[in-house]
Image (spheres, rainbow, N blue to C red):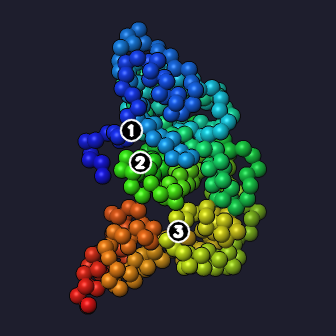
Amino acid sequence: MRTAARPELAGHVLTRDADLGRFRTHLNALFYPATVRSLSRDATGRGELRGARTENVTVGIMRFGQDTSVDPGRHAGHYHVNVVLHGTVVAAAGDRQCVGTAGTAAVFSPGLTHRLVHCARGAEQIGVKIGRDLVDDELEALLGRPAEHPLQFEVAFPLTDPAGRSWHNTLRLLIGELDDDGLIGTPVMRRRYEQLLAGGLLLGQRHNHTAALRGDQGGEPAPRPAAVRAVIDLVQARPEEPYTLGDLARAGGVSARRLQEGFRRHVGVPPMAYLAGVRLDRVRRDLRAGIAPVTAVAHHWGFTHLGRFSTAYRERFGERPSQTAAGACTRR
């Protein structure tokens, strides 16, 4: 695990260099070709770039050693999010411009020109490139139908709101996994983290399909109990699979919003809460049967964050997982 003092992606340093040309080469290799220019009279400051990628997501943490502009132009194949960690970054997408400081991000959609107009010396940010197919497929799953119009996000993304904080936490979780090279080393877990990041962006940041996702537009009937039963059957049969809300909605043949309404009406809890409950029940069954260790059992049933798992387990059963396991040993 990373220590608190260790920089994120410390094991993935691509360059630490005062030469802007070499910094540009590494930046372009990680993301895409861009024009990178110094805006400083003093061009001696050292920049730093750390980066890693999965199949559909690229993450780079960059610090600018001098006032800099970055202009990648127009790209059709990716969505891009820049999260400001320190300093000031002025970003523009098409004719829209926003000034980013710590706690803010800028979201760029495919087909629009986007650029970092001014990255102040010492500014640090996380750049996230997300494959277009990944995001568009997740949108279709959440809607329960193909999108009628190309997805376009609003540029300014506040990370101090609950939804923004949640997405930012998901990003930091992904970065932590890339740092540790643990479960993310398996394809199924990489896909899960990618879908969490894409789905969180769709639900957390406003865009031209937000109204449909939030139910501000009527016309679709409430889900039939058959849709809810189909998801319940799937979860009961294979709760360990890395389902997202979009996956469950697809299995039920309805939109994510309608599936949530159906579960609240017929089950009493949202579908993802139902899934978590089934997984916790399976963990308890295995622990009571003497299957150990706790960590292995939790991971088997789909729990990747052990702290949250332990809290949820204690809230559901009134004891820690280790106490259940110890009781099984005593009964032997």
- On screen, 288 above or below 179? below
Name, please, the residue furthest toward the bottom.
Answer: 331
- Residue 47, x across and y down, in percent: 38, 24
Q: Nearer the viewer, residue 210 or 318?
A: 318
Q: Amino acid at mark 1?
A: His
Secondary element type, mark 1: helix
- On screen, 237 above or below 191? below
Q: Image check: 117 left or right of 121?
A: right
Read off the residue under disc 1: 12
- Residue 179, x across and y down, in percent: 37, 46
Secondary element type, mark 2: helix
Indicate which disc residue 295 carries. none
Indicate which disc residue 241 carries. 3
- On screen, 296 above or below 79? below
Q: Nearer the viewer, residue 267 or 27?
A: 27
Mark 3 or mark 1, whichever is nearer to me: 1
Where's the C terminus, which quadrant? bottom left
First in sequence: mark 2 vs mark 1: 1
Q: Image check: 218 left or right of 135?
A: right
* Residue in the image at 43% along x and 79% along y: 282
Residues packed near mark 2 inside 10 Å, few (<14), some (14 to 19) or many (20 plus): many
Q: Amino acid at mark 3?
A: Glu
- One can see residue 330 in this view: yes
First in sequence: mark 2 vs mark 3: 2
Do labels 2 and 1 touch, CB within 8 Å? yes
